[in-house]
Amino acid sequence: MAQNEPALLKVESLSVSYGHIQALKSASLEVYPGEIVVLIGANGAGKTTLLETVLGINAQVTGSVTFDGRSIRGVSADRNVRSGICLVPEGRGVFASMSVLDNLLLGAHHNMRNVSKNLRRIYDWFPILEKRRDQIARTLSGGERQMLAIGRALMSAPRLIMVDEPSIGLAPIVVNDIFAILTRLNREGYTILLSEQNAYKALKCAHRGYVLETGSLTLSGTAGELLNDPGVRQAYLGA
């Protein structure tokens, strides 16, 4: 974690609307190299909108997004992936009719020069994916599909991994595995921006966090500060 360095990702006063619905309202955040930063909030708070807008999927109404010191406002998602941003979407978005290996190779479509090296690393991190490499993705368990979604994103050799709601629909023991994987990836040097409804699990593995409520970032702090904040405890931690 290196907050003495410039922010890798900087979002300033970002507002996004879908028709007459304002999904984000002047949201600002920073992610520094080597951090895990978590967005916590209820379903519909705007977490997915923020991540998709950073990637370049949504049009921005106002505000700015800067990655590695360069504005990426209006830049296409494909170009942002090439520059080092990836998104693991909510719902373990894999190509169900394709094999595990083909899903992984699709993640490397613009980085084929290092595909063998990156594939070896993915298999080292996720041995089950090597075992199931010829298996059709729809036949995997929910946890295996989440690992495949993360592995496919890693094949693009990202500098920033954004992960949207990785624990939804998974058994508690599998959730523990997924957060252990994210923590390990961070120790390997990956910077992670995570959105998650399971605030306790997310904050326990994060360095810092932001609270998003109905499109507005209402609170920020270190993970410890948010875990001990009475409002956060009451709203998100059941305490």
Image (cartoon, grey):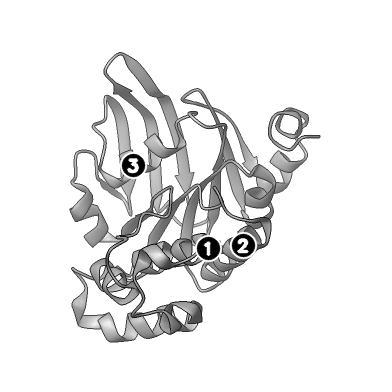
Task: Identify residue for label 2.
Answer: 174
Furthest-top residue in this view: 20
Disc on the earlier residue, 3 or 1:
3
* Residue in the image at 41% along x and 78% along y: 122
Evaluate if marks 2 and 1 touch, with contact meaning CB atoms under 8 Å apart. yes
Disc 3 to disc 1, C-alpha distance: 23 Å
Q: Find numbered disc 3 in the image and state the secondary structure of the residue it sits on.
A: helix
| Residue 203, x across and y down, in percent | 66, 49
The quadrant the C terminus occupies is top right
Name the mark nearer the viewer: 3 or 2: 2
* Towards the viewer: 74 or 68: 74
- Kindly identify the residue that appears in the image at 36 percent across and 29 percent down: 14
Label whose residue precedes the other's in the sequence (3 or 2): 3
Quote the CA–CA distance across marks 3 and 2.
25 Å
Residue at 37%, 19% in the rendered image: 22
Which residue position is annotated with label 1? 143
Label 3 or label 1, whichever lies nearer to me, is 1
Give the amino acid type for the residue marked by disc 1 in the picture.
Gly
Residue type marked 2: Val
Which quadrant of the figure has residue 148?
A: bottom left
Residue 100, compared with residue 5, is above or below; it is below
Looking at this view, is 32 or 57 the one in front? 57
In the drawing, does residue 114 fall left or right of residue 189? left
- Seen in the image, is 58 located left or right of residue 139? left
At mark 2, the secondary structure is helix
Which quadrant of the figure has residue 93? bottom left
Crowding near the residue tagged with mark 2, few <14, some 14–19, many ≥20 C-alpha atoms within 10 Å: some
Coordinates of residue 24 in the picture (x, y in percent): 40, 26
Residue receiving disc 3: 52
